[in-house]
């Protein structure tokens, strides 16, 4: 189940009209789409956007004189952008807030769990790792890599042979891994910032005669049916998930804001959802059921502050959704 599909489930249950435009990670296309939305005759109440490829400043500039309220999700501002743009509701009053995930925690959790599982299987001693990061100009990719580096700083016995940019793509990670796994034949751990890069590296390992989850332990991050099945069959050793629900949670915040219940009073104008968690096999099985049912039966009204004005904060946990 895709990020946008989960947003649609939330919007439907909250009585909101949602239109999704796909920029395919192209900054130029994203900026053009934002311009088109902001200049429509019938404009939306809210424009939800991401800071992919550092697009936030231009989108905020375009909307400066608009009556559309802007809300940022998924990618936090960089430090340089923060110095320039400030906080939501400051320089750009119609930028009403943001909601991002704990990506740095996700990178750290995956690395720690990979190392821990290797120790359980093989004991102490030096071990070599290969890492695949996302797009260079994407803040959440940078955050996940910072988490990896934090974990490695605590484990000097783990030698990171190389961190390469797989750009989130399976085909690119496959080509990179074909070369790197031959260059570094002692690699036992592969940290990947998403599932597609993990699958690309797995494919390369299998072509070289290796068995994912046995000869080399892999981490991955996502909620696709493919990666959940890979976790259940042992090819993926460590799986982080949760971010797919972020857009749906944004729908809850905007629904409440429109109803006069400002989310700023329930966690602030810029919030971080502690969504990422490591899934074990029972949790992966439960998540697989939710994905296959396409979120049918999930009612996001129960997470709203409407009817519960005393609510002081939102519960952004993945467990809340799947239980």
Image (cartoon, rainbow, N blue to C red):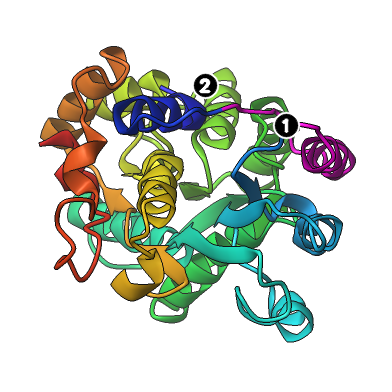
Question: Closer to the camera: disc 1 or disc 2?
Answer: 1
Please indicate whether residue 11 sits to the left or right of residue 124 in the image.
right
Helix, strand or loop at mark 1: loop
- Is residue 183 covered in magenta? no
Q: Position of residue 109 (x, y in %)?
A: 34, 61
Q: Looking at the picture, tell me which residue is in the foreground, 282 or 125.
A: 282
Helix, strand or loop at mark 2: helix
Mark 1 or mark 2: whose residue is earlier in sequence = 1
Which residue position is annotated with label 2? 206
- Is residue 33 covered in magenta? yes
Dot 2: few (<14), some (14–19), or many (≥20) neighbours within 10 Å? few
* Residue 158 appears in the rendering: no
Please indicate whether residue 323 sits to the left or right of residue 278 in the image.
left
Q: Position of residue 166 (x, y in %)?
A: 69, 42
Residue farthest toward the top in the current orientation of the protein? 293
Q: Residue at x 63, y 55 (%)?
A: 70
Of the numbered discs in the image, which one, if any, rests on residue 42? 1
Residue farthest toward the bottom in the current orientation of the protein? 83
Q: Position of residue 291 (x, y in %)?
A: 30, 21
* Residue 18 appears in the rendering: yes
On screen, residue 241 above or below 7: below
Dot 1: few (<14), some (14–19), or many (≥20) neighbours within 10 Å? few
Residue 297 figure quarter: top left
Q: Position of residue 236 (x, y in %)?
A: 35, 34
On screen, residue 73 above or below 3: below
- Location of the N terminus (image quadrant): top left
Residue range corresponding to the magenta coloring: 19-42
Q: Looking at the picture, tell me which residue is in the foreground, 95 or 74.
A: 95
Distance of mark 1 from mark 2, alpha carbons?
53 Å
Marks counted in the figure total 2
- Location of the C terminus (image quadrant): top left
């Amino acid at each position: 189940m895709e990020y946008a599909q989960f947003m649609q489930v939330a919007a439907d249950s909250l009585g909101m009209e949602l239109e999704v435009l796909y920029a395919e990670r192209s900054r130029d296309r994203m900026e053009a789409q934002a311009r088109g939305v902001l200049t429509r005759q019938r404009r939306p109440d809210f424009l939800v956007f991401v800071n992919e490829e550092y697009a936030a400043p231009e989108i905020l500039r375009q909307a400066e004189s608009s009556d559309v309220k802007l809300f940022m999700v998924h990618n936090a501002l960089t430090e340089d952008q923060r110095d320039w743009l400030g906080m939501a509701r400051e320089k750009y009053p119609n930028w009403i807030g943001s909601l991002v995930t704990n990506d740095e925690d996700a990178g750290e959790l995956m690395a720690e769990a990979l190392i821990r599982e290797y120790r359980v299987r093989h004991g102490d001693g030096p071990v070599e790792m290969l890492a695949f990061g996302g797009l260079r100009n994407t803040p959440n990719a940078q955050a996940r890599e910072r988490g990896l580096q934090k974990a490695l700083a605590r484990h000097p016995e783990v030698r990171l042979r190389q961190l390469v940019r797989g750009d989130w793509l399976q085909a690119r990670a496959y080509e990179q891994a074909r070369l790197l796994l031959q260059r570094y034949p002692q690699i036992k751990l592969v940290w990947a910032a998403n599932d597609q890069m993990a699958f690309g590296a797995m494919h390369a390992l299998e072509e070289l005669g290796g068995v994912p989850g046995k000869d080399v332990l892999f981490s991955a991050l996502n909620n696709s049916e493919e990666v959940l099945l890979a976790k259940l069959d042992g090819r993926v050793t460590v799986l982080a998930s949760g971010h797919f629900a972020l857009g749906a949670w944004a729908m809850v915040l905007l629904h409440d804001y429109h109803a006069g219940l400002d989310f700023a009073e329930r966690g602030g104008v810029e919030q971080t959802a502690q969504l990422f968690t490591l899934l074990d096999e029972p949790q992966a099985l439960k998540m697989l059921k939710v994905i296959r049912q396409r979120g049918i039966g999930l009612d996001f009204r129960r997470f709203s502050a409407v009817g519960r004005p005393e609510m002081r904060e939102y519960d952004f946990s993945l467990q809340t959704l799947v239980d």
